[in-house]
Structures are given as C-alpha cells and as structure tokens.
Image (cartoon, rainbow, N blue to C red):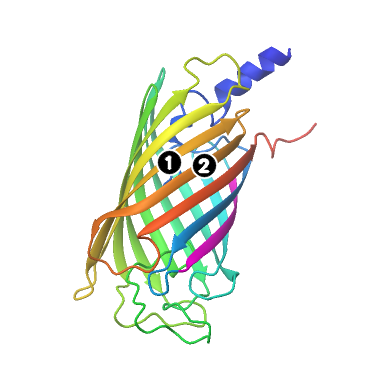
Amino acid sequence: MRRFVGMMLLCSLGFTSVKAQELYVNSEPASNMPAKSLGLRLTNKFMKMQHDQRTAMRFDPEMMVGINKNWMMHGQTFFGNVMQDNIRFEGASVYAKYRFLSNDQPHAHFRMAAYARVSVIDNPYLPTGADGKPVMHAKNEDLDLEGGASGANVGIVATELLHKLALSGTLGYNRYTNNVNHNILDDLSRNAVNYSISAGYLLFPKKYKSYEQTNMNLYVEFLGKSNMDAGKTGYYVDVAPAIQFIFNSTTRLDFSYRTQLAGDMQRQMLYSQYLVRVEHNIFNAFKKRK
C-alpha cells in the first residue's frame, strides 16, 4: 500500500520526472503547482552594492497556493539592507498566474500562462548612507518590483518540455509608481519591458524508481529588461546559471549566481548576485476532511 501511494504521489506532484526541470530558479514557468497545495519558500539574495562595495542582502519569505489546475497565487514579503544600512521590512508583493493553454503528451508538453504581480514597497529610490541621507551619486535605473519599487507587472510565459529538457520564455510589461513615503525620481523610467529565456535539464536520477529519489537539475537563464520612457532608455541582459536539488518530491534547495552579460543601464545591485533558496511543499493541504 505504501509503495502504491508513493508511486501515485510521484505521478501527481509538481516535482515529478516530467516537471522537475522546469522549476526555474530566477523565473516562473507556465506550469502551476498542484491544486490544493501549499508551498513555503525562503529566498536569500546577496548582492554587491556599486556605490560603497558592501555586500547587501534581501530575505524573501513567500507563501504559494495552488488553487486549481489553472490558477496559482504567491504572497511575498521583503526584508533587507539593500537601500538602507539596517535590515528592515521593505514591503510586500502578490503574484497570480493563470494557465490558459496546455498541450500534454507522454514525457512532453507545451503550456502558456498569463501572470500579474502587484508590489507595495517602502524604500528610497537612492541608497542611503550611514547618516541616513541619500547617496546622490548612486544612480539606479533598474527598478525592481521584488523589494525595490512599487508598481505592477503583467506578462505571458510559454514553456516547452521535451523529456529531460525544459525551455521557457517570458515577455512582460512593468509600470512603476511611487513608493510608500518616497516619490519616484524624475529621471527614472516609469515603464519597462522584461524578457527571459530559461532552460532546465534533469541530470539525476537517470531513471525514476521511487518518489524518495533525490532530483538534481541544472539551469541556465537569460534575464533582460529595457526601459521605455523617452530620454530614459537603458537595457541589460543577465545570465544566471543554477543548480537545484529536490528531496522526497517535496523539498527543494536552489543555488544560483547571476551576472550581467551586456547592457548600458546604471544599476546599483545586480551586476552580480548570489541566491540561496529552500522551499517545502505540502500537497492536498486544503483537501476537505471527512
């Protein structure tokens, strides 16, 4: 009986042999987590600030809910010392994704989804020094909805799975607004487009025998953004290789390094970044008990 339950779990979870390699570290796939499931995620990012060369951090506790096969939602909070010297609460974000196309085949599928994010952030647009005053020469043209700026992001994501290889692409639009207690600076672009291409490969196990087997996935992601306002243009393209381990089909551990490949956008924190993440999923968390 335990073996049967385990194999059924293996076939149904989001961390299965045909889905593990699309659990991208720096972007979201078109696939959703299983219905009525709950995910708890802790992400820690470390980045070198350009104006003073210190290593700042941003800590992101996150809760994810699989509503049904087509809808999922994330709730995320941000704590860090990126824009100020002391670690503090920076704001919160809500993310929703709707899968509107699914073409499934054995060991392969193609899916498309629409997504939206709304962020409310309490951070200055310029980093502050130890005296609490803005560092005027520390210009940052890269506004970030995950802790750096308030606003909204909408877009489309498409994901193709081909046995052990998963490919995904994203195109989105960003609209930035005033932060809590801080007005957006006049020389910053309020509009931008973001884009990404991601690839994931399932390295181990070579053959699935049990849901208790550890998965090892390798990723490479290309992440870009272009500002759109006249006279405030700028772009960048980053590369982010990553390695991922999945234990017992429920718990995942991510390591990623992100650095810029090309661009002319002035940025304070993302010329290089390290990411460490741990995530645990509870399946059938909202199943009605008899």
Q: State the residue position of label 1.
A: 242
Residue occupying the point 31% across, 76% down: 188
Left or right placement of residue 89 versus residue 103 in this view: right
Say if mark 1 contacts mark 2, CB within 8 Å. Answer: yes
Q: Secondary structure at mark 1?
A: strand
Q: Does the magenta-highlighted stretch encompass residue 64?
A: yes
Indicate the position of residue 120 as horizontal and vertical percent values: 51, 69
* Residue 239 appearing in the image: yes
Left or right placement of residue 212 versus residue 188 in this view: right
Which range is magenta?
Answer: 54-66
Residue occupying the point 29% across, 69% down: 266
Question: Given the current orientation, which residue lies at the most extreme right position?
Answer: 290
Indicate the position of residue 50 as horizontal and vertical percent values: 38, 70
Residue occupying the point 55% across, 54% down: 44
Q: Which three-letter amino acid code belongs to the residue tagged 2?
A: Asp
Q: State the residue position of label 2.
A: 254
